[in-house]
Image (cartoon, helix red, strand yellow):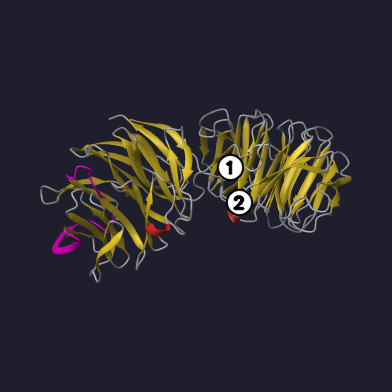
């Protein structure tokens, strides 16, 4: 039996120069955003509480609550819009439409939750407005020559719709049925965001020209602009109104968020978010007393009106697919260290109800392929940037001196007591001691894929594309090839010794998991699954394998028929790595950039 205890959600997926729409819950409890094929719903007061919706076949680009709060509409890169239930855990699908033929960029509902407008890219039209329960058109959103970035609907009668486009103009529509009234042509760059005030009296448009213009909500007449000549020194990607319609916040590529008094047209507060390119602000949301902004890094900032230079909190995590993870206990408290496709390493503090942290300084510049912790409390990572890093997990900062440059790209790293590390690279095997290369084996005669050091530090096992496991003895600072190999069923893709050193487990590309007894001269015990990753439980009695088929199996060494199956571990995404917190608790990481914690009952 298995129970999903926790979902540690991914951050929003960000793209430079592209607005990120964050949806707010009309009841004020949750906010939502998208990453890959997932819609992530998080509690705004306690963002560790999260839910993930994964029913889209394509990348999801935007999700918005209906004003009733009972449904969410989410749109994807193929133009499909799914409307689904928020009240049930299963999120049952209510309706599905394809109103445009390209990427959906924004969605808006009328205040009675009966009509919706969808805009984005398409072949012949860039927007549609229709009845939510039948898909029947209730107007025409034509009038633009390029994709529409943003749409909003006035939340009281008489209804009005405003849109903003890459053709540097906006449009104003009256209805229903909605008909084009006139063009808004004050911007000199892409129009990124349009939003009505909650009371419907005003709407604003913001653009790549750094300007925010204000209009009358009912007539569409221009009223003025915010901040005089320039609202921001960079493109403005998002705006969000205060609940009382008197103020708004704006997020900009100039790495600031501004809080505006709309009546006076002046900025009350400027939140400086940093100096790095990843500090550009691409999305924002004002919900109840919370002011949220989203950085290009994917970090979610809770802004503090009283201290504009320091957010109240910043939610960190992964925005790209997780490639590897490991668990390590500091003072008895388990932390999960996970590495992703973009080189980011995240620290998940389980004791603090899922707070995320990271190492300061400059780390890996490319995918982190493997992460393990050695007995000196260092996180040892290998990356596609051709380096091994040794990072002290207590100091929580990268050290420029603890980087070892490899001659070839390292695929795998493992560690053993006494400062030993084994790096398996594309064309060589490297033994390291105390963070220095001490021995290199070249011209192997086979292509090495993955390696593991026996906990006793006496043997190194290396799996190759020749469908063999090669055993080397570690003598002092050398690796000695004594010609000892074990035949496997396919190319070994992952391997690990059990913590007590009694067993070696392997998985191969023929979808076979195998266990070998070290004492019985590596005699084979069979298991079959479709695995790509594996991890031993601390007591060496169970090991878990995760696979391309989204399955995780937990095996018992003494009884090959006894296993626990976790189907659909990360729906639509394969399980890239897994690790144990204790004998009954397993964590899994995946290409959906989420981490999940499972409780097992044998």
| Image location of residue 374, percent across then percent down | 30, 48
What label does residue 300 carry, if any? Answer: 1
Q: Work out whether 379 lies above or below 133.
A: below
Residues 89 and 495: in front is 495
Query: Can the viewer see residue 177 in this picture?
Result: no
Residues 446 and 432: in front is 432
The answer to whether 341 appears left or right of 582 in the picture is right
Query: Can the viewer see residue 533 in this picture?
Result: yes
| Image location of residue 406, percent across then percent down | 35, 65
Disc 1 packing (10 Å; few <14; some 14–19; many ≥20): many
Disc 2 packing (10 Å; few <14; some 14–19; many ≥20): many
Which residue ends up furthest to the bottom in the rendered image? 443
* Magenta run includes residue 500: yes
Separation of residues labelled 2 and 1 (CA atoms): 11 Å
Q: Earlier in the sequence, mark 2 or mark 1?
A: 2
Residues 349 and 181: in front is 349
Q: Work out whether 85 lies above or below 99.
A: above
Give the residue at x 45% y 33%. Answer: 352
Residue 45: name its quadrant: top right
- Range shown magenta: 476-502
The residue wearing badge 2 is 279
Secondary structure beneath label 1: strand
């Amino acid at each position: 039996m298995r129970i999903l205890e926790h979902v540690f959600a991914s951050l929003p997926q960000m793209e430079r120069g592209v607005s990120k729409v964050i949806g707010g819950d009309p009841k004020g409890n949750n906010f939502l955003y998208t990453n890959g094929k997932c819609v992530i719903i998080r509690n705004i007061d306690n963002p560790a509480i999260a839910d993930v919706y994964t029913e889209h076949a394509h990348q999801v680009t935007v999700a918005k609550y209906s004003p009733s709060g009972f449904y969410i509409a989410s749109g994807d890169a193929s133009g499909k819009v799914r409307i689904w239930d928020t009240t049930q855990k299963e999120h049952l699908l209510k309706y599905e439409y394809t109103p445009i033929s390209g990427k959906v960029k924004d969605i808006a509902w009328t205040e009675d939750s009966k009509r919706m407008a969808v805009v984005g890219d398409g072949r012949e039209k860039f927007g549609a407005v229709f009845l939510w329960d039948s898909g029947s058109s209730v107007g025409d959103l034509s009038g633009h020559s390029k994709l529409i970035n943003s749409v909003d609907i006035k939340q009281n009668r008489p209804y009005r719709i405003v849109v903003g486009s890459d053709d540097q103009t906006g449009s104003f529509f009256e209805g229903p049925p909605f008909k084009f009234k006139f063009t808004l042509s004050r911007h000199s760059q892409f129009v990124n965001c349009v939003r009505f005030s909650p009371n419907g009296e005003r709407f604003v448009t913001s653009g790549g020209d750094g300007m925010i213009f204000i209009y009358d909500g009912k007539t569409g007449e221009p009223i003025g602009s915010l901040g005089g000549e320039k609202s921001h020194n960079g493109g403005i990607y998002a705006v969000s109104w205060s609940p009382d319609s008197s103020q708004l916040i704006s997020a900009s590529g100039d790495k600031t968020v501004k809080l505006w008094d709309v009546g006076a047209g002046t900025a009350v507060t400027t939140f400086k978010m940093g100096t790095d390119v990843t500090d550009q602000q691409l999305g924002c949301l004002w919900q109840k007393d919370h002011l949220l902004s989203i950085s290009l890094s994917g970090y979610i900032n809770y802004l503090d009106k009283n201290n504009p230079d320091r957010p109240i909190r910043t939610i960190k995590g992964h925005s790209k697919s997780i490639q590897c993870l490991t668990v390590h206990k500091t003072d008895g408290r388990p932390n999960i260290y996970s590495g992703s496709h973009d080189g980011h390493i995240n620290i998940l503090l389980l004791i603090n109800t899922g707070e995320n942290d990271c190492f300061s300084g400059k780390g890996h510049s490319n995918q982190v392929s493997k992460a393990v912790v050695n007995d000196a409390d260092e996180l040892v990572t290998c990356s596609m940037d051709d380096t091994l890093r040794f990072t002290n997990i207590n100091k929580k900062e990268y050290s420029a001196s603890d980087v070892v440059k490899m001659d070839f790209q390292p695929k795998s790293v493992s560690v053993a007591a006494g400062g030993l590390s084994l790096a398996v690279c594309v064309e060589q095997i490297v033994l390291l001691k105390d963070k220095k290369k001490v021995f290199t084996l070249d011209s192997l005669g086979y292509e090495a894929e993955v390696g593991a050091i026996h906990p006793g530090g006496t043997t190194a096992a290396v799996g190759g594309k020749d469908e063999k496991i090669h055993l080397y003895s570690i003598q002092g600072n050398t690796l000695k090839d004594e010609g000892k190999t074990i035949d496997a069923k396919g190319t070994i893709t992952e391997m690990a010794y059990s913590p007590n050193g009694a067993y070696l487990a392997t998985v191969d590309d023929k979808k076979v998991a195998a266990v070998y007894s070290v004492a019985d001269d590596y005699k084979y015990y069979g298991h079959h699954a479709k695995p790509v990753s594996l991890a031993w439980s601390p007591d060496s009695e169970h090991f878990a394998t995760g696979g391309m088929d989204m399955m995780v199996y937990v095996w018992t060494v003494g009884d090959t028929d006894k296993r626990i199956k976790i189907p659909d571990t990360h729906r639509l995404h394969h399980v890239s790595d897994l690790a144990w917190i204790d004998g009954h608790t397993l964590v899994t990481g995946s290409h959906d950039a989420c981490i999940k914690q499972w409780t097992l009952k044998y």
